[in-house]
Amino acid sequence: MRTPLVATLTLLAACAPPRAAKPYPNSEPPAGAAKPEAEVGVVRYFDRAVDLAPFLTGFPYTQWMPSLRTGKLFVLKTGERYELQVLDLADDSIRDPIQATKVSDVDWSQRSLWRLHHHAASATLWLHADARNDERMNLWTLNLKTGALEQVTDHDYVYGFGLDDAESQIAYLPRAGEAPPYRTCLRVLDIASKAAREVVCDTPALTFTWSSPRFSPDGREVFFAAQVDGDRNRTQLVAVDLTAARPVVRVLTDPKVTRTDAELLEGWLDADTALLLANDDGYRNLYSLSRKTGAIKQLTRFTEDLTSAFITAIGVVGVHRSPLGSSLAVIDPRTGKVLAARPLPGAADVLEGRDGRVIWTHEAPDQYFELNVQPVHADAQGPAFGPGFSLGPAPAVREAVAQCRAERVKIPTFDRDKATGKPRELHAFVLTPRRPPADPGHRLALVEAFYGGENHYSTFANVMCAAGLTVVSPTVRGGDGFGKAFAALNDRDLGGDEIVDLFHVARWTERTLGLKPAQIGVFGGSHGGYATMRALTFPPGTKGHAERYEFGFGLAHAGFSDIKSFHDQCNIPDWVVLESGDPSRPEDLARMKDRSPLSHVDLLAAPLLLTHGSNDWRVPVGESRAFHDRARALGKPVTLVEFAGQGHHIEGLGRIAELYQARFDLLQQVAASAAGP
């Protein structure tokens, strides 16, 4: 059993690795053996070469950030460097992102950019960003005339920000403290002077959290999310009167109701009425709020989550969806009646809607991303979308990156659904290669450990399919897309039944695809990285289950190996408490230690590849290092590849190619070993 890290270890120390990251491969190529230019971005699995260029630069745009208020569409252009660019939506001739212009010389592959607001009056972008890919998020400005980037706030962490209608002030939620319990205060910043004042701070009984603060139309009140006792299951919408002599926090939602979402929409119907999304009834639905009376009324009753919604000239345009499909809907903001609906396969989302325009996206496991810009209007026939334009890859690129065939399946697991009394079945997508390998000895299947079953395009899955491999992506208990109750099934059970679900998926994969356990592996990132390590070190007898599956390999990216040390060092300790328990309670701490992969490294038998960014704060790199060092000391088959300067995700064409080649090198060794002599 391992000794936990010293409790007084600071976040700064956790984020400043004691040793340099090692590039992949670990040895220099022989003199004169430089990779030919034509081979840059090409990775190999046996005799099959996979060109990553169509996946990463065929349509090199990501993170679309529209500003319909100012008629601009901002986007990151990827490559070896990430460049922030802008499209002018007022120019009807623009129909291709290649016409976008560069905003500045900042390389966003070396930083995190979560959100921006275009302040047209000062030709400035207000950014929610960090300095070094470590998610120490603050507010920055970027001058659109000079390209100068300036840090405005200097806090340990800023949860979110929002501007008033006059665009003269910003409300934001900065957090202080290197370890929980943190202290977070609502601050209001004057845009002209950049001077900020502290309005009110949270308490242990009501903690401020991730939220985009919204102002009332007159700018006198601010609305945002808070948590009762730091519990993510008791999220509340709160309000603060900025004009009060002693501002206090008013809780607007019912604290007795279990709720994980409470988000005020941008814009108001009138001076008194706002709209919000909340999942009081088990799914994210639309509610109205009276500022005058405080009354909250449920407007819609969808039995799948309303994932996005914006107020437009024809009503609320939003998407309600599950992993089974989406519906783009126009909703009456007063009654909740669906005025028009368009069913869509895959996953759709509305990025922004305002006045007479809406911008929405669409993708599916076998369909690459597409962005749509459309006018909206209402006539005698009712609300309608006018002819607009779409942005997406050229047909040749779209065909090149669609390497998987997607099939939706149901996979039985070990228990019964309490709501129906029937045996529980897990939703999953099986993604099979369009060009299967000619040699059956090259066949492998990869089971996604967490965040699986999503109805999205996955670059990882399609790169695996391009190599001739199969991906099975299930939604294990605790996953999103099937309502609040299903997502709560792994609360305080991290590393428990969610892992047993994976074993049943692996056995189904073995039976259905005709593979041996040695040909079936598990993979994932973040929570999925933890789940991968946990699945490979799962002690039989956990929770009384006589369960274990001998996976043939594992790929864990940015996973945590010790739940207690992760809680003490990460920037999301409230998530750890929700999923695993409170480490201040002896019984919870004992469970956290037992559920930590680091406590059971001796059970690791399958080859495991760990990958991690050296600047990751959400899951500090020490979590992978600790598991790697313990496993190597025991002679276990583990490899660690670190990426210097990278955060929770690996960015940049060259670094991503290194990541995939490291994966394929392990997979080739596994396949060769499974095939035997």
Image (tube, rainbow, N blue to C red):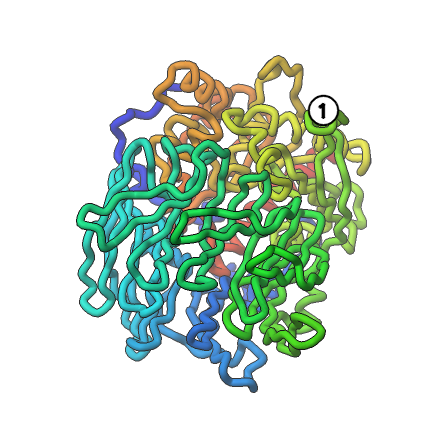
Is the C terminus in the top left, top right, bottom left or bottom right quadrant? top right
Q: Dividing the picture into quarters, in which one does residue 254 lie?
A: top left
- Against 76, is 412 above or below? above
Q: Position of residue 240 (x, y in %)?
A: 30, 49
Q: Is residue 281 above or below residue 146?
A: above
Of the pair 560 and 2, the residue shown nearer to us = 560
Residue 27 in sight here: no
Mark 1 highlights which residue?
416
Number of callouts: 1
10 Å crowding of disc 1: few (<14), some (14-19), many (20+): few
Q: Position of residue 379 (x, y in %)?
A: 66, 77
* Residue 196 horizontal side relative to residue 111, left or right: left
Disc 1 marks which amino acid? Arg
**Residue 487 x/y as whole percent:** 58, 36
In front: 49, or 371?
371
Q: Which residue: 22% across, 51% down?
A: 244
Q: Is residue 514 left or right of residue 74?
A: right
Q: Secondary structure at mark 1?
A: strand
Judge by depth and name the residue closer to the eye, 371 or 295: 295
Q: Residue 502, position in %: x, y?
A: 65, 31
Q: Classify residue 226 as left or right of residue 467.
A: left
**Viewport quadrant of the N terminus:** top left
- In which image quadrant can residue 359 be found? bottom right
Picture quarter containing residue 142? bottom left
Q: Residue at x 63, y 58 (%)?
A: 348
Residue at screen point 33% across, 76% down: 144
Q: Residue furthest front?
A: 293
Confirm whether residue 373 shows in the render.
Answer: yes
